[in-house]
Image (spheres, grey):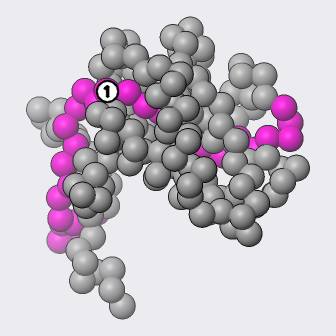
C-alpha cells in the first residue's frame, strides 16, 4: 500500500555498507522514472549511476550530511551509502527540470523502499567537484544526489511538538526522530 511505503521511505543517513546495490538495481530505479509525468513531456532528466566502491567513496566526499545534527559529521566507514544516483538536468532539452526532479526522486525512493533499500536526497552538494570526479559535461545541470543503501538506523515520524520545531534529531539510543505537522496544520 502506498501509505505504508511513504511511512517506510525516510531520509536514511546510515547504511549497512556491506550490502551493495548493483548497476541493474539502479537501472530498475531509473526505469520507474520513464513512467512519471514530465513538464510539457520534455523529459529533461538524465542520471549518472554510481555503484563501484571506489567511485562511491569519491561521491561521498562531495556531500553535506544532516545539517540539523550539528554534532555529527556524517556516517562512519561501514555506514556509508552503497550507491548513488546523480540527478542531472539536460539543459539542451530544458533549462527547467526542478518539478520533474522532485517527482522522479520520490518515485525512485519509493521503488527502492519496495526493494528493501532506503535513501536520502542531497541538495547540499559540491557540484563542481562532483562534475570533475564523474567527468560530466557542462550541458548537464547537477541538481541532486540520491544516496542509497540498506538502512542501518531507525527513523520515526512523530507529531510536531508544541514549540513548532521541525528539526529532526537523534536520541541517546541513536533513533532518528522526524517531527511532522498535523493534517489540520496543512489544510487552510
Rendered-image quadrant of the N terminus? bottom left
Residue 73 point in image, percent of width and height? 41, 27
Depth check, front residue: 125 or 143: 143
Which of the 4 image quarters holds residue 186?
bottom left
Depth check, front residue: 72 or 185: 185
Name which residue lies at 56% across and 58% down.
Answer: 36
Name which residue lies at 70% across and 35% down.
Answer: 127
Indicate whether 4 appears above or below 109: below
Label 1 sits on residue: 150
Which residue reaches farthest top? 54
* Left or right of 135 on screen, residue 157: left
Which residue reaches farthest bottom? 188
Indicate whether 98 appears above or below 45: below
Name which residue lies at 58% across and 23% down.
Answer: 50
* Left or right of 70 on screen, residue 175: left
Depth check, front residue: 133 or 39: 39
Element under disc 1: loop
Mark 1, Cα crowd under 10 Å, few <14 / some 14-19 / many 20+, is many
Indicate whether 79 appears above or below 115: above
**From where the camera sits, is residue 69 visible?**
no
* Left or right of 2 on screen, residue 65: right
Q: Which residues are magenta?
A: 137-165
In the image, residue 164 lies in the stretch drawn in magenta: yes
Residue 120 point in image, percent of width and height? 43, 40
**From where the camera sits, is residue 56 visible?**
yes
Name which residue lies at 51% across and 24% down.
Answer: 24
Residue 131 point in image, percent of width and height? 75, 28
Amino acid at each position: 500500500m502506498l501509505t505504508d511505503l511513504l511511512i517506510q521511505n525516510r531520509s536514511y543517513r546510515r547504511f549497512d555498507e556491506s550490502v551493495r546495490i548493483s548497476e541493474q538495481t539502479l537501472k530498475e530505479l531509473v526505469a520507474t522514472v520513464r513512467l512519471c509525468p514530465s513538464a510539457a513531456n520534455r523529459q529533461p532528466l538524465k542520471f549518472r549511476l554510481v555503484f563501484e566502491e571506489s567511485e562511491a567513496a569519491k561521491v561521498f566526499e562531495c556531500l553535506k550530511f544532516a545539517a540539523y545534527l550539528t554534532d555529527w559529521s556524517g556516517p562512519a566507514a561501514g555506514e556509508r551509502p552503497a550507491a548513488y544516483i546523480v540527478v542531472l538536468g539536460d539543459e539542451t532539452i530544458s533549462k527547467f527540470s526542478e518539478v520533474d526532479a522532485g517527482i522522479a526522486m520520490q518515485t525512485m525512493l519509493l521503488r527502492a523502499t519496495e526493494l528493501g533499500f532506503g535513501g536520502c536526497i542531497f541538495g547540499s552538494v559540491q557540484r563542481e567537484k562532483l562534475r570533475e570526479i564523474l567527468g560530466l559535461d557542462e550541458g548537464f545541470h547537477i541538481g541532486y544526489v540520491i544516496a542509497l543503501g540498506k538502512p542501518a538506523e531507525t527513523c520515526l515520524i512523530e507529531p510536531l511538538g508544541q514549540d513548532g520545531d521541525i528539526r529532526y534529531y537523534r536520541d541517546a539510543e541513536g533513533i532518528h526522530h522526524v517531527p511532522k505537522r498535523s493534517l489540520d496544520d496543512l489544510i487552510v
